[in-house]
Image (cartoon, helix red, strand yellow):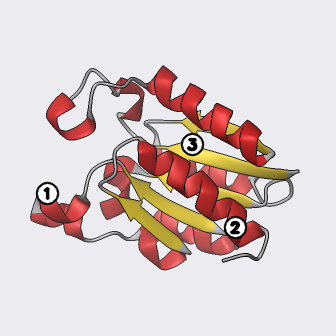
Amino acid sequence: MSKILIINGPNLNLLGEREQSQYGKKDYKFLEENCLNRAKELKIDLELKQSNVEGEIVNFIQETRSNNQGIIINAGGYTHTSVAILDALLAVKKPTIELHITNIYKREDFRHKSLISKAADGIICGLGVEGYIMALNGIKKIIDNEN
C-alpha cells in the first residue's frame, strides 16, 4: 500500500470561513474526509498535515524520507516565498504534486510565480477542493508508473 502525505500550508485550516468567493464554502474537515475516502478507494495510506509555520512544513517534508512514497503539497502563501520548502522537496526526492485551490494565475501578480514548482512532478490549480482528489489520482499513477 502506498503511503502519501498531504501537506497544507498557512490559512488552509480556515477553509469555509475565509474568502468564500475564492476558496468556497467547504471546510477543512470536509477536505480531510473527502481525501481520506478517496485514498481508501485507491488503497493509499494517507496522512494529512496542516501548519501555518514554514519550519514545521519543512519538517513534515523531511519526515517523508523513509516512510512515504509521495507528497501532495498546497503550500499556500509560502508557495511564492519559500526557498526552504523548495530545498526540502528537492532534498527528499519524492514524487510531488503541487496543488492550489484557486487559479494562482488569475490572482495578484505576486501569486503567479511558484518557487516550489521546480520540485513538482505535476501542478493542479483552480479546481477547488476537488483538485485534491485529482492530485491523489495523479500521485497514485506516478507511484505505480502509470503516468
Q: Is mark 1 on a helix, strand or loop?
A: loop
Position above or below: 62 against 43: below
Residue 55 visible? The answer is no
Q: Which residue is drawn at 39% across and 34% down?
A: 12
Give the residue at mark 2.
141
Q: How far apart are marks 1 and 3 (CA)?
A: 27 Å
Point out the residue furthest to the front here: 41
Tag in front: 1 or 3? 1
* Quadrant showing the C terminus: bottom right
Tag in front: 1 or 2? 2
Q: Name which of mark 1 and mark 2 comes first in the sequence.
A: 1
Tag in front: 2 or 3? 2
Give the residue at mark 3.
56
Q: Name which of mark 1 and mark 3 comes first in the sequence.
A: 3
Query: Which quarter of the figure has residue 106?
Result: bottom left
Q: Residue at x 50, y 47 (%)?
A: 132
Position above or below: 10 against 55: above
